[in-house]
Image: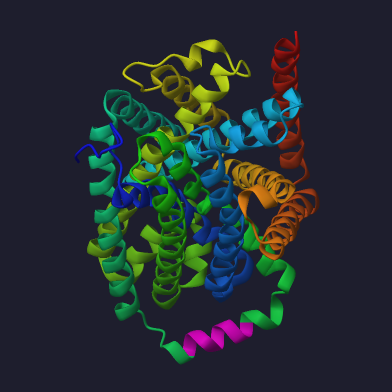
Amino acid sequence: MEKDKTGNKNLGLPELVAIALGGMVGGGIFTILGISASMIGNLTPVAIIVGGMIAALAAYSYVKLGLYYRDEGATYSFYKKTYPSSPFSASVIGWFVIFGYISTLALYAYTFSSYAISSTAYAENVWVRKILAIGVIAVFALINSWSVNGMGKIEDFMVYTKLIVLAIISFVLMKSGSASFPTFLEGVARDAEHASYIEILLVASLTFVAYEGFQLVINAVNEMKQPEKNIPRAIYLAIALAILIYVVISLGALFSIPLSDLIKNKEFALASGAKAAIGNVGAYMVIAGALLATSSAVSGTVFGSSRQAAVIAKDGYFPAIFARRNNNIPVNAIIGMSAMACFLILIGGLELILEFGSITFLLVSLLMALANFRIREKTDSSVFWTVCSIVGLALGTVMILWYELTHKPFQIVFIVLLYGVLTAGAWLYSKRIKK
């Protein structure tokens, strides 16, 4: 990549789309497929599309705020500048969004390790899975600490290679499946009789974490070419591609893999199902696609979120050590966030990490939509689309909280306690700013 006339700008549209897709098409589809199948069966593609629509609504405010503020601090900086008289508001959203990224980093690494050992004797060994997940985070923390340009090229290769691999996997699954399209539609009609609109919306809300990577584009605003054109293009194109990829993969899985198999092995459902449907070759193809997808997701998340953490630390809302940079790379933030993701892997399971991430990013995206509504005239935003964003994101947040309260009360207690700790940390640092 060459420098453009504006200076040291290494990232063009292909790299930005790669970063966004790297953050989205990672642990998401491989994680939510089994969970969604267990809740709504053949209606999974419908929920995936609805989740993508919610993500597009959330992206509207991010694009408008990103073009207006042009700040690599993204979510945190947008809120801080929109509400300049409230240090606590800026601090709490900074803490929430960074720990949301930490949870998705843990999710992607956990999914990587689940698929990596899925065909071995250690497939059910939780501690082998956790140790391998920590190892993959360490590898990509080192890569991101090394070079922006090097990370960009590696991300390009992994993302666009994984798209080809995932397309091949989906085609092979659909061709080898015993179910025909009419049979699949019969399954959809049957599941529609038992599943309610609320359940579909709930699954769509749970899938939101699989789309959250689009925000990572804005974190690279200081290192991208033509941000006024590339921010909206990269974000909307990446979301559209992610929806297409997720739907095709889910259709391939539902056509060829019995629902019982998808439900039984939630943490590596696609690989186990593919092995039963098309043999070892199919399983190895799925594993290769999963490893590429989750690797690029780990790399893209480390890249974007570390820059946001450095901005927050520079403003005094995080420990100052996270603000230090080496050749403009926030090495300390990369190492610190990676270490916290490893800790989350050690103490949590897959579903807990998934649900914490979904709640956090729905909540943060809702706050972004509210901020955009407040300055809608400055950002030249449509009142209609901004209000639609607020309603959709609020509904999604309420749905997940209701599900947690009625089905997993212990888990919601843990999540609430974690939010309490984050809020306390944010309050302490905001008090320091006031002083």
Please report the residue visible at 43 percent of the width from the left and 17 percent of the height from the top: 332
Residue 432 shown in magenta: no
Q: Position of residue 28 (x, y in %)?
A: 48, 53
Q: Quadrant of the C terminus?
A: top right
Q: Quadrant of the N terminus?
A: top left
Please report the residue visible at 28 percent of the width from the left and 35 percent of the height from the top: 151
In the displayed structure image, the side of residue 370 where residue 166 appears, left or right: left
In the displayed structure image, the side of residue 60 where residue 395 appears, left or right: right
Number of numbered discs overlaid on the protein picture: 0
In the displayed structure image, the side of residue 163 where residue 202 appears, left or right: right
Q: Position of residue 127 (x, y in %)?
A: 45, 32
Q: Position of residue 412 (x, y in %)?
A: 74, 41
Magenta segment = 183-190
Please report the residue visible at 30 percent of the width from the left and 80 percent of the height from the top: 175
Please report the residue visible at 38 percent of the width from the left and 19 percent of the height from the top: 331
- Residue 8 visible? The answer is yes
Asked if residue 135 is positioned above or below residue 253 in the image, the reply reads: above
In the displayed structure image, the side of residue 322 where residue 225 appears, left or right: left
Asked if residue 3 is positioned above or below residue 120 in the image, the reply reads: above
Asked if residue 9 is positioned above or below residue 369 in the image, the reply reads: above
Q: Residue 121 is drawn in which quadrant?
A: top left
Which residue, as the protein is rendered here, is positioned at the far left? 2
- Residue 119 visible? The answer is no
